[in-house]
């Protein structure tokens, strides 16, 4: 029995090590995807998305959104939603700043804040919308299969600032 437990512990340790080796691949893909998202570059996000990917933001507020916020199934539906957002609000950038990023079990967790900048009609100024945010990106077979955003929409810092 003791040998069986030792063997089982060794197998579990080796399995954990193998999973850890997969994490850098998932993390590099998730970081590239989130860099494109931060820059509001939807075209750069597209090749990193699985065809059946899911985009969720259960914390999103707004017209036409129910209590579960945003839920889109499929790359095409997710891209359409993102392109609609970009076309409607014209962000200069979403400007994510991540205080912590870690990978675990094909999921890459980003914690920090969104620091979005939007143009205004007044030259020399922009509108900034800043809120705490957590994003969880699940990567399988080299592609993003699930994107989850959780933002503090209820209490953002917002206002006009000088253009950068």
Image: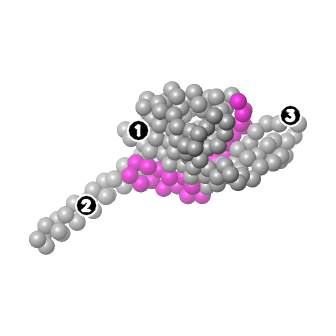
At x 44%, y 49%, the residue is: 107
Q: Residue furthest front?
A: 67
- Badge 1 element: loop
Query: Which quadrant does the C terminus fall into?
Result: top right
Image coordinates for residue 81, horizontal then vertical, percent: 59, 31
* Residue 34 visible in the snapshot: no
The span picked out in magenta is 88-111
Read off the residue under disc 3: 121
Q: Can you tell which quarter of the image residue 20 is in?
A: bottom left
Q: Can you tell which quarter of the image residue 145 is in?
A: top left
Q: Is residue 160 toward the left or the right of residue 155 in the image? A: right
Q: Can you tell which quarter of the image residue 116 is in?
A: top right
CA gap, disc 1 to disc 3?
41 Å
* Residue 96 visible in the snapshot: yes
Is residue 98 located in the magenta-colored stretch of the structure? Answer: yes
Closer to the chain start, of discs 1 and 3, is: 3
- Badge 3 element: loop
């Amino acid at each position: 029995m003791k040998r069986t437990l030792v063997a089982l512990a060794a197998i579990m340790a080796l399995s954990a090590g193998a999973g850890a080796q997969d994490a850098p691949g998932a993390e590099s893909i998730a970081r590239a995807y989130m860099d494109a998202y931060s820059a509001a570059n939807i075209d750069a996000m597209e090749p990193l998305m699985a065809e059946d990917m899911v985009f969720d933001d259960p914390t999103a507020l707004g017209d036409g959104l129910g209590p579960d916020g945003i839920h889109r199934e499929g790359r095409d539906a997710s891209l359409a939603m993102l392109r609609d957002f970009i076309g409607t609000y014209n962000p200069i950038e979403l400007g994510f700043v991540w205080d912590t990023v870690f990978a675990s079990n094909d999921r890459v967790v980003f914690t920090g804040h969104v620091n979005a900048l939007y143009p205004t009609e007044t030259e020399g100024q922009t509108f900034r919308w800043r809120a705490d945010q957590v994003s969880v990106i699940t990567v399988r077979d080299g592609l993003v299969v699930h994107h989850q955003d959780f933002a503090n929409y209820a209490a953002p810092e917002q206002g006009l600032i000088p253009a950068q």
